[in-house]
Image (spheres, rainbow, N blue to C red):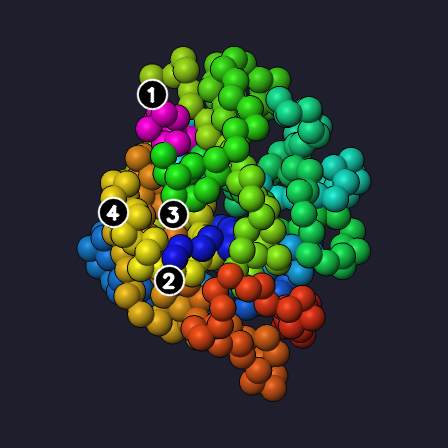
Amino acid sequence: MKKIISGIQQMGIGVPDVNEIWSWYRKFFGIDIKVFEEAAPAPLMTDYTGGFVQSRTATLALSLDGGGGFEIWQFTSRSTEKPAFEIQLGDYGIFACKIKSRDIRSTYQFFKQEGAKITPIEQTPEGKLHFFTKDPNGNLFEIVEGLGWFGNTHFPSKTGGVSGAIIGVSSIEKSLPLYQQILGYTEVVYDEKRSFKSFSELNGGKGEFRRVLLRHPEERKGPFSELLGPSEIELIQSIDRKDCRKIFENRFWGDWGFIHLCFDVTGMNALKTECEKAGFPFTVDTSDTFDMGEAGGRFSYIEDPDGTLIEFVETHKVPLIKKIGWYIHLKNRNPEKRLPKWMLKCMRFSRYKA
């Protein structure tokens, strides 16, 4: 079976309190569909958790307006650690999560009236409007013009789910093979090197940067591709800073911040072979179905050239209506075919309203 990437499934976010921050994400982003919730040890991730098995709780939630979801992740065996330094633009790792909006100005007004921390609306080098906001834990989100939508819940913030990420790298040239060849972001929307006014409000954002925005020119295929929608990756390289650091330096996967960017895939074996040939071998691989409470699938991880974690999930089972025990099983379905829209919309019965 060939490799198929359906889209960004979720952004992993390490938090000190799942319920507290998810309440904020529901209010501001409309991420209110609970796909699964599981509390268990994470024995396969010991290479990233100090060599010891750590326990955690994980909640996967998404928006039926479209876009990727959040895997909200909290340690239960230890405290969630913040970075020992103040993260600056250009540091290596996932610096910001992109969230799509139907109407940037309306979203901005909603965030402003609800007291969220926001930067002024500016234009990207592409000429599109955007702004940044911080959640109560200090994680940075870029609100961007949405490229595609699955539904319309008329949520007051006019946002959808995850539509990409800003990733700090030490060398854009060394990073491009992964993001373009493996992940399919072959379209270069812009590639500019200078100071950017829209970055000036960000910590460390007043310097000079090379900024490359990548998109996938072809529509994604696969069972969840219509729900997950189009996405983009923006690579940021600092030109004048000599002290850039890894955002997760001396910390564990699962600690405070953006812990990984996850893609929904089929054809994991073909993907594994492709990654190995390109010099990005799997560092974690369940090899078969891994149970995640109400959902299940095979997952794996690779690292980009700076150690940023990219996760792949081949979904085998997912709940549609939990109350009646209706699950969709994907192993024997055509991997290129999208699931019917009406079927995915049944996930609205898993909307979390508390």
- Image quadrant for the C terminus? bottom right
- Residue with the mark numbered 4: 276
Position in image of residue 21 (x %, y %): 56, 54
Q: Give the magenta range.
A: 168-176
Measure how far apart labels 3 and 4 are at the Cα level.
14 Å
Labels 1 and 2: the sequence-earlier one: 2
Q: Is residue 51 left or right of residue 315?
A: left
Q: Is the residue marked by circle 1 packed among few (<14), some (14-19), or many (20+) residues within 10 Å?
A: few
Q: Is the residue marked by circle 3 packed among few (<14), some (14-19), or many (20+) residues within 10 Å?
A: some
Measure how far apart labels 3 and 2 are at the Cα level.
21 Å
Measure how far apart labels 1 and 4 are at the Cα level.
31 Å
Say what secondary structure mark 2 lies in. Answer: loop
Say what secondary structure mark 3 lies in. Answer: strand
Residue type marked 2: Met
Q: From the image, state whether disc 1 or disc 4 is nearer to you.
A: 4
Above-or-below relation of 350 to 207: below
Question: Magenta includes 169?
Answer: yes
Labels 4 and 2: the sequence-earlier one: 2
* Residue at 52%, 33% in the rendered image: 187
- Residue with the mark numbered 2: 1
